[in-house]
Amino acid sequence: MVNPLPARGTVAASRLQLPPGPWTSVLDCLCARFSAISRAQWLDRIARGRVLDAAGLPIAVDTPYRVGAQIRYFREVVDEAAIAATESVLYADAHLVVADKPHGLPVTPAGKFVCETLLTRLIHRLGNPDLVPLHRIDHDTAGLVLFSANPRSRAAYHALFSERGIDKGYEALARPLPALTFPLTRRSRLLRGEPFFRMREGEGEPNSETRIAVIERGEHLWRYALTPLTGRKHQLRVHMAALGASIINDRCYPVLCDANPDSSERPLQLLAKSLAFVDPLDGRQRRFESALTLDLLHLAADTVF
């Protein structure tokens, strides 16, 4: 059974720009592009108005294929699992929404999750289908995610990230590193690893940089402050593992521990704690801080992964 979706305006649509190919119809292209979805399923989605053209109008079974045309479709997942953890909205105005995301909740629809994502929940909760995340954090990381609420001001806020105009602060729990002197900076070249979702350090000019400090020293664990100066995938996790203190409950680094790197019972002890920037619309200094915490005192050494 397909998990019931919210109304079309309250779930984010995926987008596809039709690639070059030999097809005569959009349907043929979709069937070839997404071979895991049967032709019967695509026919059913088209019949229910779940596949749209660039103008937002439902396509027909015989809609002609055209290279470069944009198609929007609504993903559907069979028996989508519910995620019990809930998000908080820390701030919302006509242009920005700041959400506090729990561990284990994906930011956008991907893989086995469509409805149970932060974006879909917020669109439904706030009644704003124009919401778009301005950045991403891993679904197994908790903390702050900034959303654009207005297409007219979106480019100005996107520029904060592309031009490094936003300060991001993270906290992590990991083993002590008493042999190192803090604060320190880790620079390295991050490359795609194996399998596809992992990263690795390699030879060459550094393309990633993280400042690392110690906030609190416990007997078995330390609380670290991590400041990414670049935004490479899994950067903080790879850098901590490379120093010899992988983040607690990290099932990807330094080695992949199982086929599924998620763990709802033992969440990754990484928190996107703060965001600070000068608002490009009015010049105000803005700072947001997560209400979530990583509990060093009550996380006993024998309970972590």
Image (cartoon, rainbow, N blue to C red):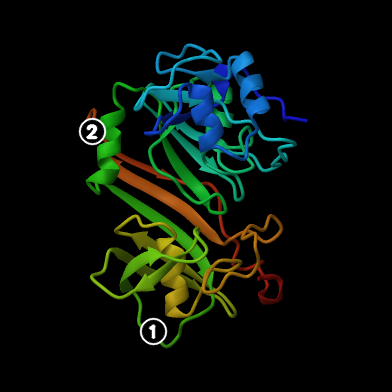
Q: What secondary structure is marked by label 2?
A: loop
The residue wearing badge 1 is 180
Please state the horizontal and vertical placement of residue 55, each as a whole percent of the image: 40, 13
Q: Is residue 98 left or right of residue 303?
A: left
Q: Which of 187 and 5 lies nearest the eye of the viewer? A: 5
Residue 55 visible here:
yes
For the point 26% across and 41% down, the residue is 160
For the point 41% across and 50% down, the residue is 274
Which image quarter holds the N terminus? top right
Give above or below for 77 relative to 302.
Answer: above
Please state the horizontal and vertical placement of residue 109, each as a whole percent of the image: 55, 37
Q: Residues within 10 Å of mark 2 (few under 14, many from 20)?
A: some
The residue wearing badge 2 is 280
Q: Is residue 78 left or right of residue 93?
A: right
Q: Which of 191 and 173 lies nearest the eye of the viewer? A: 191
Q: Is residue 102 left or right of residue 71?
A: right
Q: CA distance from mark 2 to mark 1?
A: 39 Å
Residue 12 visible here:
no
Give above or below for 105 relative to 264.
Answer: above
Q: Earlier in the sequence, mark 2 or mark 1?
A: 1
Residue 232: quarter of image: bottom left
Q: Amino acid at mark 2?
A: Pro
Please state the horizontal and vertical placement of residue 212, each as a whole percent of the image: 37, 69
Q: Amino acid at mark 1?
A: Leu
Residue 219: quarter of image: bottom right
Q: What secondary structure is marked by label 1?
A: loop
Give above or below for 279 relative to 259.
Answer: above
Asked whether the beta carbons under mark 2 and mark 1 sit within 8 Å of each other, the answer is no
Which image quarter holds the C terminus? bottom right
Q: Residues within 10 Å of mark 1 (few under 14, many from 20)?
A: few
- Residue at the bottom extreme? 179
